[in-house]
Amino acid sequence: MSTKKLTILAVCIALNTVLSSIIRIEGMAPMSTVFNIIFATFGTFYVTLIALVTAILRMIIFGIPPLALTGAVFGAILAGIGYKLSKSIFGAWFGEFVGTGIIGSIISVPVMKIFMDLDSNAVWFLYTPRFVGATIIGGIIAVVIYSSLKNSRAFKNIQEIFDKEHDHNSTYRKS
């Protein structure tokens, strides 16, 4: 992996860690959604890596519960797949919605039951509305930000750095 790519990933992780922990609504992390959707344009592996490392850092540094993992990682994977299949920010948003809003919220129930003593029926109504709300709020913000970024030379250069390795790996595997 190139130094440029590692540097970009480190900056993305740092931004995501700080902003997702500061700009949040109790029980909701819409900035995590923003980053998952925008970083989905780098590729499924990279958006998932960024989300995973960010979630672990948020849990260690800021004491965020394991919801940081269950919410962000499934959303990142499906946002990356959604973007890859559609080549659209809306495909990434849909993937994030399904991954975080639905799957992540459902997976959070048994995970958080381990950490908290909650009534099993009440728990189902605790996470899904918050996770869905975060993906809607974060998705709107992501689309607005992406609309500004997508034509900027700097963002295009970053995407090219990630695309070049993908193209190189595809060519390498074929030979």
Image: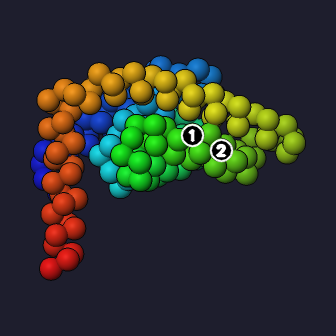
The correct choice, above or below, for 168 with respect to 79 in the image is below
Marks 1,2: beta carbons within 8 A: yes
**Is residue 171 among what the camera can see?**
yes
Left or right of 42 on screen, residue 2: left
Q: Is residue 109 above or below residue 174?
A: above
Residues 141 and 126: in front is: 141
Which residue occupies 34% across, 28% down? 146
Q: Secondary structure at mark 2?
A: helix
- The residue at the point 58 percent across, 20 percent down is 25
**Label 2 environment density (alpha carbons within 10 Å; few <14, some 14–19, many ≥20):** many
Q: Is residue 119 left or right of residue 28?
A: right
How far across and how far down the image is residue 29, in percent?
Answer: 54, 29
Q: Amino acid at mark 1?
A: Phe
Find residue 97 and name its label.
1
Position of residue 86 in the picture relative to residue 26 (left or right): left
Mark 1 or mark 2, earlier in chain: 1
Say whether residue 136 is left or right of residue 9.
right
Name the colouring of the figure: rainbow
Q: Is residue 47 visible?
A: no
Q: Amino acid at mark 2?
A: Ile
Residue depicted at 70% across the width and 48% down the height: 106
Q: Secondary structure at mark 1?
A: helix
Q: Please name the residue that numbered disc 2 is placed on.
A: 102
Q: What whole-number distance in Å separates the C-alpha atoms at marks 1 and 2?
A: 7 Å
